Amino acid sequence: MRPIYVVNNFGQFNHLILRMLRDLDIEARMVPNTTPPDEVAAGCRGLVLGGGPSIARTGRCAEYLDQDIPVLGICLGLHVIARRFGGMVAPGKLGGYGAVEVGIRDHDRILRGYPDRVVVWASHQDEVVTLPAGFEVLASSGICPVEAIAHRDRPLFGVQWHPEVSHSFEGRRVYENFDAVCRGEA
């Protein structure tokens, strides 16, 4: 079975994403965000767009969304997805990392198995302020109305928080659920 690729967008937690996937016995490999899109599509069964400091440093990530593979965007990765499909991202009311209580609206696919409310670790330096067409909100919080999204027809998902850090409630579930999507089981 082909691996899930983690796209390195120079974020401090990208190696933790890779480590979590491997700890879950999910074959994974980190790739630079300059990898040609056809190589990405041919080499993996799913793609995690990792976090990072700036949309300007996301390389070819937007092009990867034109490939026919499942994609999970984490923080900055969510912003790449939103912008690529016509959504808007703007500075959030709160910057920096910290705990936030998130309300789960949709318990299917990527957030399967979560309770209605969870505490996660997130940065709200930037956040999605306008949802792109074709997407739905899966989770929100008191400080950010768009904490998680999914495309209605394609396997494209994004979360504002960092499931890979120990501060996020059962973050492994996001990656287990994404693996199920990549295997065609969800």
Image: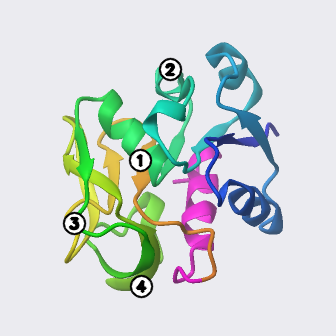
Please say whether residue 139 is one of the residues in the magenta stretch: no
Circle 1 — which element?
Answer: helix
Describe the colour scheme in one phrase: rainbow
The residue that disc 4 covers is 119
Of badges 4 and 3, nearer the viewer stands: 3
- Please name the residue shown 24% across and 47% down the image: 90
Q: CA distance from mark 1 to mark 4?
A: 19 Å
In terms of sequence position, does the residue under pointer 3 or pointer 2 come before the other?
2
Mark yes or no: residue 32 visible: yes
Circle 4 — which element?
Answer: strand
Q: CA distance from mark 1 to mark 2?
A: 14 Å
**Within 10 Å of the Cα at label 2, are there few (<14), some (14-19), or many (20+) other Cα atoms?**
few
Q: Nearer the viewer, residue 10 or 128?
A: 10
Instruction: Indicate the quadrant where residue 141 lies.
Output: bottom left
Q: CA distance from mark 4 to mark 3?
A: 18 Å
The residue that disc 3 covers is 93
Q: CA distance from mark 1 to mark 3?
A: 17 Å
The residue that disc 2 covers is 63
In terms of sequence position, does the residue under pointer 1 or pointer 3 come before the other?
1
Above or below 11: residue 25: below
Q: Is residue 25 left or right of residue 91?
A: right
Image coordinates of residue 176 in percent, x first then y, are 63, 64
Name the quarter where the N terminus is drawn: top right
Region in magenta = 167-186
